[in-house]
Image (cartoon, rainbow, N blue to C red):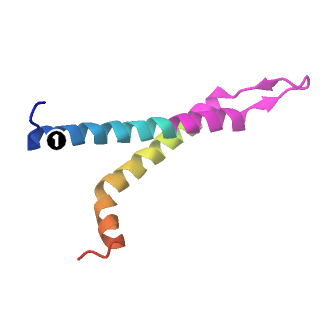
Amino acid sequence: MPVETFHTLIARNKRNSFILIFGFMVFFVAMGLIIGVVWGGYTDDLGRYHANWGFGAMVAIIAGVVAFFLTLGSFFGGDSVLLGVSRAK
């Protein structure tokens, strides 16, 4: 078993943090696209559903911007929130 140094642990933590943040943003954008396509679609006179991909893309872009700012807020402000909740000085 190889010995893990502090630098390898830091590198692994940074990689895992990037994967988590990227996964959150992809999930948020995908949910925005799905909600936008379903919500923006319409049913014609014969009862067939037509998806509105343009509206879905617009909602996905908005969801991406929201996810970006949520990620920035949690990345830079998460430590102070955690310390405040635990009443640390």
Residue 55 in magenta stretch: yes
Question: In the rendered view, does 25 fall on the left or right side of 48?
Answer: left
- Majority secondary structure of magenta residues: helix
**Where's residue 1, x and y in %?**
13, 30
**Where's residue 63, x and y in %?**
52, 42
**83 shown above or below 46:** below
Q: Residue at x 64, y 27 (%)?
A: 53
Residue 78: image quadrant is: bottom left
Instruction: Pick the residue in front: 57 or 74.
Output: 74
Residue position for label 1: 9
The range drawn in magenta is 29-58
Q: Residue at x 49, y 37 (%)?
A: 27
Residue 6 in magenta stretch: no
Q: Residue at x 29, y 69 (%)?
A: 83
Instruction: Pick the residue in front: 39 or 21.
Output: 21
**Where's residue 19, x and y in %?**
33, 36
Residue 10: image quadrant is: top left
Instruction: Pick the residue in front: 40 or 84.
Output: 84
**Where's residue 66, x and y in %?**
47, 47
Asked whether residue 77 appears in the rendered view, the answer is: no
Mark 1: secondary structure: helix
**77 shown above or below 32:** below
Task: Tell me the amino acid under the disc marked 1.
Answer: Leu
Quadrant (top left, top right, bottom left, bottom right) of the C terminus: bottom left
